[in-house]
Image: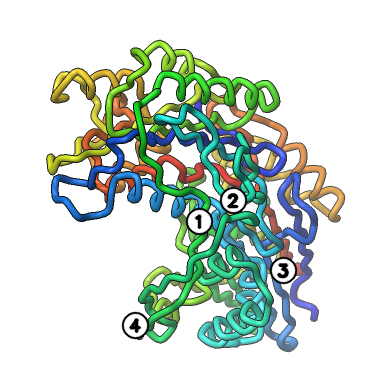
Amino acid sequence: MTFLKYDAYKMQKAGNSAEEYEDGYSIKEINDEEVRFAIADGATESSFSGIWASLLCEGYTESIPISQLKESWLAKVDALELPWYAREKAEQGAWAAYLGASFFSGKSNRLEIQAYGDCNIFQIREGNLLKAFPLTRSSEFGSTPALLSSLDQKQECDDDFQNIDYHWLQGDNFLLMTDALAAWFLNEIESKGDGFNRVLAIGNQEEFEKLVNEEREKRDPEKGPRLKNDDVTLIKIELES
Amino acid sequence: MPYIAEISRTHPSCFVFLIDQSGSMQDPFGSVSGLKTKAMGVADAINRLLQNLVIKCTKSEGIRDYYHVSVIGYGGKGVGPAFTGSLKGKELVKISEIGNNPARLEERKRTVEDSRGEMVEQTFKFPIWFEPTSYGGTPMNAAIQKATSNVVNWLADHPDCFPPIVINISDGESTDGDPFQSAYDLMTLSSSDGEVLLFNLHISSSNHRPIEYPDNPDYLPDQQAKLLFSMSSTLPEYMRTMVEKEGIPVSYNTRGFVFNADLVSVIRFLDIGTRPSNMR
């Protein structure tokens, strides 16, 4: 693959083990002219949401219909021997937000994006934020985002799916982020903090973890930590110039 | 002090439920005889609440101890822990211990919509931790003091926690003195994240409409209602938002108090009062 470079970084909530990470991501080079990326954020309030987040990401990059992903989730959870409370919880389903992006090379330089909920993509050109999708302001991130259920087959045609096409230029950078990181990132841009440049400068997992840990420690007295203690996932994409 | 502290296994919070077990609790909910007694209705609501709390704290690997819970009964037999089964006599219990130790599991049936949108009957297990009891007087004052002593101990160990929430469920007047001062002492305890929240749920033998989440005592019908209003905390912002979403008007003075509650408002109140704001 020659038309882009990418890296992915992830980190679980502070106080949790790595196995308790409930975001997901998937990257697939389809052919020389198409690369697909997906990130998902499994809801803390549901159980087995990490499995659901991973399925949604694989489903996007592998072109598997969501109805089939729901069946896979159910089959995995049904096969488990669970105590009464875990069975009850599983019967409520898992919930997740996700975002998928397919980059095409060739003459079109096209980019197809599909989002459900508050995972976000950012397009950066010549060191400036050009576009943010689907959310554009930090204040839009709330505690009740649209979430895709692992159970309800009727939900598939829901209006909450958002699709958009972009075009990219050589030298553009794209960032895919799950909600807590995306909200923090937009807030850094709005308040002219140094977060924007710090994210662009991340070159390895250690640097990513250092930034996340530092920002979780910074606190606003009325709102709590600047970067909410949540699972965080970042995919950085650079269109080669 | 904004009620924004994280609720997690390393920073758990606590709930205390005070349950009136006096003689009048054997009267039926509402004025019609032959229905479920108030004691039975409250026991069902508390068992359902404990079940919901356990399920809220359940993740793929098991129950996470986001909460410690105390259920205290007060009535003719005095004031004390009200769990039955293997938790009998325990004051403050981790939510995982509650989930793993119901006194028994009843098989119940419910109708649910399946993944294809068809209605099907489903058997489920309904856990029981708490049984209906009704006998003697209403030592509310001593019950609130008991809650205070549990909460003081909790705060000493968890000074930065999301503030403990105490919910008092009663159908009558205190028979061991005016509880206002005891309630005030409890409501003015605090963690670094805010004052302890005390909410009151007054349940009714009459068919009068419930007065839910009032913000002004002048419109309350009697002294007992005014007293309970004065010993109920104002709702923090995140709870005001939840109440508003239920279609109930709120203001900055709205208190966590329901007067003349029926079974529907009991369940709704317990749900709002125990819905987590910031679980991680």
Is B226 displayed left or right of A30 in the figure? left
In space, the residues marked 3 and 4 are separated at their CA atoms by 51 Å
What is the CA distance from the residue labelled 1 to the residue labelled 3? Answer: 60 Å
Which residue has dot 3 on it? Answer: A239
Badge 2 and badge 1 both on one subunit: yes
Q: Quadrant of residue B182?
A: top left
- The chain ID associated with circle 4 is B
Up/down of A33 relative to B54, above or below: below
Decide if residue B55 is on the left or right side of residue B214.
right
Quote the CA–CA distance across marks 2 and 1: 9 Å
Percent coordinates x, y for residue A216 in the rendering: 70, 38
Q: Which mark is residue B128?
A: 1
Q: Which mark is residue B119?
A: 4
Q: Amino acid at mark 1?
A: Ile
Q: Amino acid at mark 2?
A: Gly
Q: Quadrant of residue B167?
A: top left
Spatial CA distance of label 2 from label 3 is 64 Å
Where residue A194 sits in the image (x, y, percent)?
Answer: 69, 37
Q: Of the residues shown, which amino acid type is indicated by label 3?
A: Leu
